[in-house]
Amino acid sequence: MSVFSAERLEQVEAKDKTKRFEKYTILVVDDEENNLQLLQEVFDGDYEVITAHDGMEALDLVQHHNDREQIRVIISDQRMPAMNGVDFLEQTIPLLPNTKRIILTGFTDVDDIIDAINKGQIYQYIVKPFINEDLRLTVQRALEAYQLEVQNLVLIKELTSLNTSLERKVEERTDALQHSLNSLRNFYYYISHELRTPLTAIQPYIRFLQRGMKCDPPTESQTSHLLVIEDNTKRVMKLVNQILDLARIESQELPTHLQSLLIHSLIRRSVKQLHGLFRPEVEVVLDLLEPEAPVLGTWDDLETVVDNLISNAAKYTETGTVQIKTEIWNSGLRMAIQDTGVGIDVSHLGTIFERFIRVDQQGLAKGTGLGLHITKALVERMGGRIGVTSEKGTGSTFWVWLQLAP
C-alpha cells in the first residue's frame, strides 16, 4: 500500500506539469564570446539564458541572483583561464546542490572526464563540436531529472514526517496499553485478595460443620449440602490462585532461576497425591526413562505443570489407561501423558492453551479455563515447549519438552 494518497500524488504531478511550462534559467559559461552567442541562440525562446565569461564571474552571478533556485542547468566550457570548468562547477555544488551540470570541451582528455564526474558532479560531458538538437535534448533530460529529484525530496520529507508522527502515535498507544495492563493487573490482585480472604475464613467452618456437634451430628442431606459448599469453595479458591499466578507470570514478577532437577520423583509424588481423582476403572502406567536424565527447570513450576497435566488426564478418562512416559527426544527430555479418555475435537486443538478456553468434553468435569494456559506459560518460562495430539473418542496425548541439564 502506498504511503502517499492518490490525491497527494496528483497534486505533486500537477505542480510538476505547471513547472515544466515555466521559463527555467540556464547559466552558460565560456571564455569565447562566439560560443556564448551560439549557445544563447540554441536555447532562445525556451529558457532564460544568462552568461558569464569565466568561473569567477559566474560564481558572482549565482551568489547575487534574485532567484538562485531557478538556475536549473549550468553549461560550462572546460578549458578557461584562471579556473577550469570542473573547478568552477565544484564550487557551485554548495550554492546549487540540485542543479544539473554539463561540461563542454573540444578535448577528449580522460583525466578531465574523470575529474568532471568525481569532483564536479557532472550530469553530462559533451565534446565539441556538438549538434544543436542533441544539446537541447540533453538539457531537456537534465531538467526532467532535476524535477524528479525535487519530487523525490518532497516525498521523502513527507515520508519522514509521517514516520515521525507514526512513531509518536505508537509510543503513545504503547504507553496507554501498558497503563491499561497495569490497571488490569492491579485489578486482578485486588479482586483475588478480596475473594481469598473470606474463602480462607469459610473453609474451617465448613469442616467444623461436617464433623457436627456431639449431640446433633449432621443428617445425610446436610452432609451432602456441605460437600457441595466445600467443593465450590475449593473451586473458587483454585480460580483465585490461578488468576494470581497468571498475573504474576505475565508481569514477570516470578523469578526464573533454572537449576538441574530430576523429574521422576515429582511425577511419582503427583500420581500418588492425585490418586483419588482417578476412577477405579482407570490404570495409571509409568514408563520412565532409565537412567533418569536431569532437566533444567524450577521445582515449583515443574510441580504445577505435572499436577495440571495429570489431573486433566484423570478428569477426562473414565476407563482404560493413563500412561506417563519420559524419553530423550530432540536433544531434550520429553514427558508425554497419554490417556484413553474422551479426546478433543481437532477444531479445538489450536485454542486449547488460550486463557479461559474450556472445551466441553461430553459433559465431563470442566476446569476454570486457566490451567492449560498457565501450564504453557510455565513451560515456556523454563525454555521448554508444550503440545497436544488428540482425536475425539480415542484419547489425548499432552507432551512437554524440557532442556537437558548440562
Image: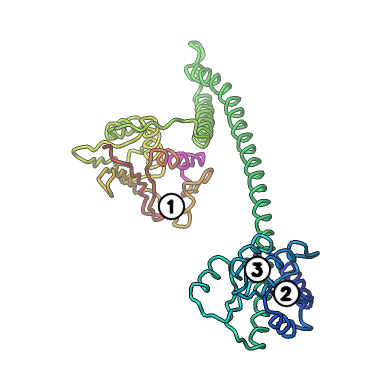
Residue topped by disc 3: 149
Q: Position of residue 64 (x, y in %)?
A: 77, 62
Q: Secondary structure at mark 1?
A: loop
The magenta stretch is 364-375
Q: Residue at x 64, y 63 (%)?
A: 93
Under mark 3, the amino acid is Glu
Residue topped by disc 1: 344
Q: Is residue 255 above or below residue 55?
A: above
Q: Position of residue 273 (x, y in %)?
A: 35, 29
Q: Secondary structure at mark 3?
A: helix
Distance of label 1 from label 3 (alpha carbons)? 62 Å
Q: Residue at x 45, y 40 (%)?
A: 377
Q: Is residue 272 above or below residue 396?
A: above
Residue 55 vs residue 236, the one in the foreground: 55
Q: Position of residue 60 (x, y in %)?
A: 73, 63
Q: How many marks?
A: 3
Count neighbours of disc 3 (C-alpha within 10 A) and say few if under 14, some if 14 to 19, many if 20 or more: few
User: Residue most toward the right?
Assistant: 66
Q: Residue at x 36, y 54 (%)?
A: 394
Q: Position of residue 332 (x, y in %)?
A: 29, 44
* Quadrant assignment, res 62: bottom right
Q: Earlier in the sequence, mark 1 or mark 3?
A: 3
The answer to if 383 sits in the magenta stretch is: no
Whether residues under marks 1 and 3 lie with C-beta atoms below 8 angstroms apart, the answer is no
User: Residue most toward the front?
Assistant: 81
Of circles 3 and 2, which is in front?
Answer: 2
Under mark 1, the amino acid is Ile
Residue topped by disc 2: 26
Residue 399 vs residue 53, the one in the foreground: 53
Of circles 1 and 3, which is in front?
Answer: 3
- Which color scheme does this rendered protein use? rainbow
